Image (tube, rainbow, N blue to C red):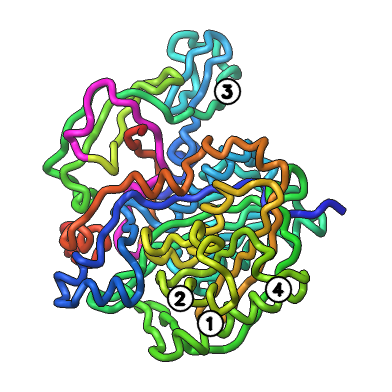
Amino acid sequence: MGELSRMWRETDHRYRMVGEKCGNCGKVYFPPRDICPTCHRDSIGKMNNVEMSGNGVVVSFTIVHDAPPAFSRQRPYILAIIKLDDGPTLTGQIVDTTPSEIDIGTRVRSVFRKISEDGHSGVIHYGYKFVKDQ
Amino acid sequence: MKKSGIVSYGSYIPRYRIKPDEIARVWGEDPENIKNGIYILSKSVPSPDEDVATISVEASRNAIKRGKINPSDIGAIYIGSESHPYAVKPTATIVSSAIGANFPLFAADYEFACKAGTAGIQNVKAMVDSGMIKYGMAIGSDTSQGAPGDVLEYSASAGGTAMILGNENVIAEINHTLSVTSDTPDFWRREGEPYPTHGERFTGEPAYFKHTISASRMMMESVGMKPQDYDFAVFHQPNGKFPTRAAKILGFTEKQYKDGLLTPFIGNTYSGSMMTGLSAILDIAKPGDRILAVSFGSGAGSDAFDLTVTDEIMKMDRESAPTIKRMLADVTWLDYALYAKFKKKIIFGDAIE
């Protein structure tokens, strides 16, 4: 049940890529943070929700061959560090492509996909992944 | 009262495709017989991480982007599908959260085989007309099922379309809508069963043709139109042959139905079928164009719509979201083994997945 509550709490950032922008220094954070690590107490009460565009560029990537169970039908899959146009850098899966089509500098955009399922009768977790931007 | 209609639209078709030749190779069928029999040249296949919720979200986001709609203004979401991810827990809740709709929201999942999405259009149109909501979104989306080796395996595909309805900045006015309904055992899937069953000879004449043709004729009579008065006609497309034959029986020409006929390239997207054909027409339609759109759902029934494209469509940047033409061009081909893995026809044990 702990996983269920955590996923539910994180729905906005997993479904819509909602991060936070510091009203003091203007820096954007994703995933969201309650306090700006630069401005500290000056940011209290000034952190505002902001939705990421989901567009970005591959900074680095790896190919996962030894996949966890939830990804066994997608093996091998691409895991990348992506620098969003909105500022933050994050880790995400790149889908609907082969490793040979991805390189450092490849433009990507976010899509809504199934992340995992809690068995055959449990809840389905959804969230963002990325595809190559054509 | 301003006439309500389609304010924006968006579709999503998974990029993976399989050809009937590949399915026929595995099951020892003659691919030419299949292609000639049902006129399907390829069908879309969902990725392992795609389902009706993800397809509906992508289609909705495309509609919102294309129409520059504020999700907070959407007061109702109805999703028609026969492959909702949950038996109990609405897909509409997932879509509402993923697009950022407001907490005060009318929402539900619909099921009426392949016409549940168009039933949603009728529902939100009535809500817009009555002033209950500013905009309403109806989605038809499916990752349809066909048992291995069954004829449905050649056609059952994946895709969806979202239509946002309102009465301001309408790109296609809905002049009239009507439905026909009867209890017909042409196609069904019992609770808990993984694959549907088709009622053999019930599929054609007593089901698809009776309902589609009746609804089309009733609509033309209601609005005083003849087939030659329409610029486009689009029908439910369980295969490439049925809608072509229905169009010809009704008196439509190939020029009128070819742009909305997608099944030969993407297969039968079930609840998304007619709506995605309409989406392809809206991609190219001009102000003043008149469209007859008729869905069909097994069980059985048909929803008919008479639409007129308005000048507003020229103000819309239709390329701001993927057009159907773009989605038809951008594909990755699968062989049967990968298709079987993607569609979970190969079952892993609990320890593996």
Task: Confirm whether circles 3 and 1 share one chain.
Answer: no
Chain designation of label 1: B
Real-space Cα separation, disc 3 to disc 1, in angstroms? 56 Å
Dots 1, 4 in contact, CB < 8 A: no
Real-space Cα separation, disc 2 to disc 1, in angstroms? 8 Å
Q: Is residue A40 magenta?
A: no
Quadrant including the N terminus of chain B: bottom right
Label 2 is placed on what type of residue? Phe
Task: Confirm whether circles 2 and 1 share one chain.
Answer: yes
- The answer to whether residue B87 shows anywhere in this view is no
Badge nearest the viewer, 4 or 3: 4
Q: Residue at x 51, y 24 (%)?
A: A20
Real-space Cα separation, disc 4 to disc 2, in angstroms? 19 Å
Determine whether the residue tagged by mark 3 lies in a helix, strand or loop. strand
**Where does residue B15 sit, x and y in percent of width and height?**
33, 49
Q: Mark number for residue A48?
A: 3
